Amino acid sequence: MFEPKLKKISKDVFKNKNLRNYFILTHKKHHREMYFQSGDKKALNFAKPKFNSFKKRIIFFLLKLGVLQPILKQIKLSQDIGQLIFVGGQIKGFDLKDKVVNSFHHIQGIPENFIKDKEVQLKLGKQGFAPKIINIDKQNNFSQEELFFPFLGNSIDNFNELLEFYDSFSYQKVKTTLLLKKIKNYLIKNKINESLFNQAIEEIKKTNYFLFTKIHGDFAKEQCLINNHKIFFVDWNLKKGLVTEDLVNYFRFEKDYFNTKEFKIILKKYPLHVLKNLEKYLMLTELLRITQGIHDFKLSKKRINNLLFQK
């Protein structure tokens, strides 16, 4: 899918030096790709945390054996991009020898936004919440940053670090009426008429305000890295948001949050106002994510139904 973009990066930025063969593993549904060199076991081992489901673990096992490689597409690229390349929200080349990450904006992304995100990361790196940026190349929409390793520990440690980040900002009280007005306008405009959503809105009304702060945005396990026993986060989409947005996104594959032991422990670390109005916060988070275009109606309805009727 993204071969033309990778070839352009190889030629324009790295001058096609040290060309090597890369295999391409494509996930068409999620528009993601992984590029890896033939016979590079270190690169495959580095990618292992990405294979985090039963089906994906089988694929990883077959890659380690070399069984799948003969049927995969190949491409010649400069090795200087990195021995392992992921194309997701961004294009990231992992140079495991020099321990740097080469990042480029996605083919569908806006270059100016990519640079803004990296400038944000530059500040967060100095504060110790993100890998430090080594260089930002605005002409090529390209950055280099420190290479850290995936954090494979428990989620509680991740949220200890994230909540420390929240605490570096002040919490803001946002009136419920303003939030619900935005949600209702979106539902009307997009002709979404779900009785369950209306019931959720009636419950949310009972709380006068909700806490907002600066959040990571699109928080996920694969964005948590470690270096010298300290946790760092990547792929920041720093924005003002409801304090539970990162929490919901992190457990986005759980139909019932409360069946997850780590979720219950993490909740205890949140402000008292969240704990007293927990179901309302979680329902509001679902509805706000819908207005942001981050939604799965089937999953959102399941979650809201649980929150309304299975307390």
Image (cartoon, rainbow, N blue to C red):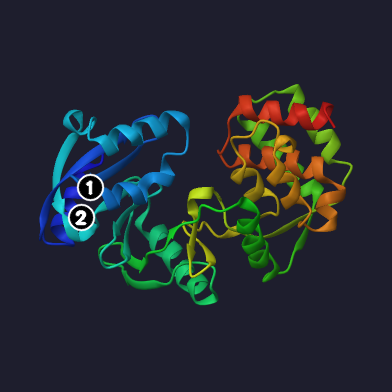
Of the 4 image quadrants, the one containing the C terminus is top right
Residue carrying label 1: 5
Q: Position of residue 125 (x, y in %)?
A: 48, 72
In the picture, the disc for residue 9 is 2
Of the 4 image quadrants, the one containing the N terminus is top left
Give the residue displayed 52% in from the left and 70% down from the top.
124
Say which quarter of the image contains residue 238: bottom right
| Picture layout, residue 132 above or below residue 191 | below
How many numbered markers are drawn? 2
Q: Is residue 272 left or right of residue 139?
A: right
Give the residue displayed 80% in from the left and 40% down from the top.
279
Q: Is residue 125 or residue 160 the one in the foreground?
A: 160
Q: Position of residue 275 (x, y in %)?
A: 83, 50
Q: Position of residue 292 (x, y in %)?
A: 58, 42
Q: Is residue 205 or residue 105 the one in the foreground?
A: 105
Q: Position of residue 164 (x, y in %)?
A: 66, 67
Kindly report the distance in space between the C-alpha atoms of the residues bearing marks 1 and 2: 6 Å
Say which quarter of the image contains residue 70: top left
Element carrying mark 1? helix
Which residue extends farthest bottom?
Answer: 126
Which residue extends farthest front?
Answer: 65
Give yes or no for contact between labels 1 and 2 (Cβ–Cβ under 8 Å). yes
Tell me if I can see residue 283 in this picture: yes
| Picture layout, residue 174 above or below residue 190 | below
Q: Is residue 22 left or right of residue 177?
A: left
Give the residue displayed 42% in from the left and 43% down from the top.
50
Which amino acid does the dot numbered 2 rest on? Ile
Crowd tier of the residue under label 2, counting other residues whose Cα lies within 10 Å: few below 14, some 14–19, many 20 or above: some
